[in-house]
Amino acid sequence: MKSFVHGEINEFVQWYDTDGNIINASDGGIIYADGKYHWYGQYLRPLSATEGGQITTVGVVMYESENLLDWKYEGVILAPSNDPESEIFAPLRFERPKIIYNDKTKQYVLWCHYVRHPGRLGRCYGESEAGVAVCDRVNGEYKWLGWSRPVDSKGFVRDSALYKDSDGTAYFIYDRHVHEEGAKPDFSEDDRCLYVVKLSDDYLSFTDTYKRIDAASWREAPAIVHKGEYYYIVTSGLTSWATNQAKAFRTKHLLDRWESIGDPCVDDETHTTFNTQSTFAFKVEGSDTHIMMFERHNTNNFVECSYVWLPVEFNDDNTIALRYKKEWSI
Ligand code: GAL
């Protein structure tokens, strides 16, 4: 029987699509639509971090599967432009893309951490923002609508995520970074914190309703999971591509106060989130299993990053636990 294979925590194990190519869908997510899982992410380059492997010339791609193990490549869903005048002139970054479906407008809405050409971490207005694109099919060509900044114009957008609640309200969660325009990237004195921002009814813009997750200052890579009375966010510290210790937070209401519940990783002896960074969480259809997706970034060659998907355990005291598995199946 097939399974999710991760290997040892210092190993990079590649996953392949049904054509035999390496799955290249960095830091994306899963959306279930038309009876299938669709896995999307940013298509990276076979280069190191110093050479810009984390920057894309292809865009966001998608794969489909019925069993979460056999993935068929569906193609590019959000392509950059070749026009130097365009906002999405390649190379750039559509980092950590996430997609949700709007039941009212019948559109799929993609938000990402947009890093303008040439895709180096932005230091000026317009370089590191929240980008949005839409499509009327899950796997069609998404149309770029532009970028903006939630909350106010002072905070750069860094890592971000999306969450659609059961009542249809959707939220943009991001690492808000208040940094002096154009200043050197010595970020040590800056104000950084995760925020939850309510989206408009059509999910295409931000409302003025938001919450600063005070407990989650200097955190990124947010992945949200909901079960029972609580919403949980798993996050990473800010050490760029180097791995660090995870920390989770919980709340009963997304716009209310969040509290820290510590590191959810069990027996993580190296305190590195099993040598990964959090990406996204989803529920397996027709089951009670929630899977949290992590990524082991390979800074020598970003095409050889590896995916680590772990089942989320929900404890009786309303905390969560994550245990490393070299290999497992649902
Ligand atoms: C990581 C972050 C990535 C990317 C990278 C750039 O920590 O999670 O999304 O922004 O830093 O240095």
Image: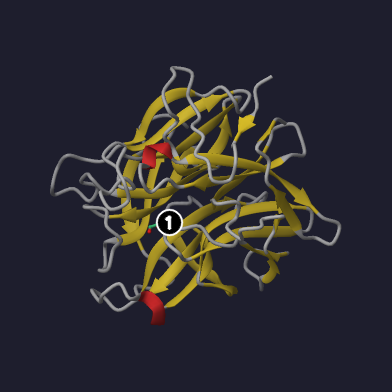
| Residue that sits furthest to the left in the current view | 84
Relative horizontal placement of residue 312, taking residue 37 as reference (left or right): right
Residue 23 rendering spot, x and y as whole percentages: 45, 30
Q: Position of residue 139 (x, y in %)?
A: 44, 29
Q: Vertically, is 24 above or below 292?
A: above
- Other residues around mark 1 within 10 Å, as few (<14) / some (14–19) / many (≥20): few
Name the foreground residue: 230 vs 23: 23
For the point 37% across and 42% down, the residue is 302
Q: Residue at x 37, y 45 (%)?
A: 133
Residue 312: x, y in percent? 71, 47
Q: Is residue 9 above or below residue 113?
A: above
Relative to 85, does residue 6 appear above or below in the rendering? above
Residue under numbered circle 1: 241
Of the four image quadrants, the one with ligand 1 is bottom left
Residue 221 screen position, x and y as percent: 51, 57
Q: Is mark 1 within 8 Å of ligand 1?
A: yes
Horizontal relation, residue 277 to residue 257: left or right: left
Colour scheme of the picture: secondary structure
Tell me the element at label 1.
loop
For this view, does 81 lie left or right of residue 77?
A: left
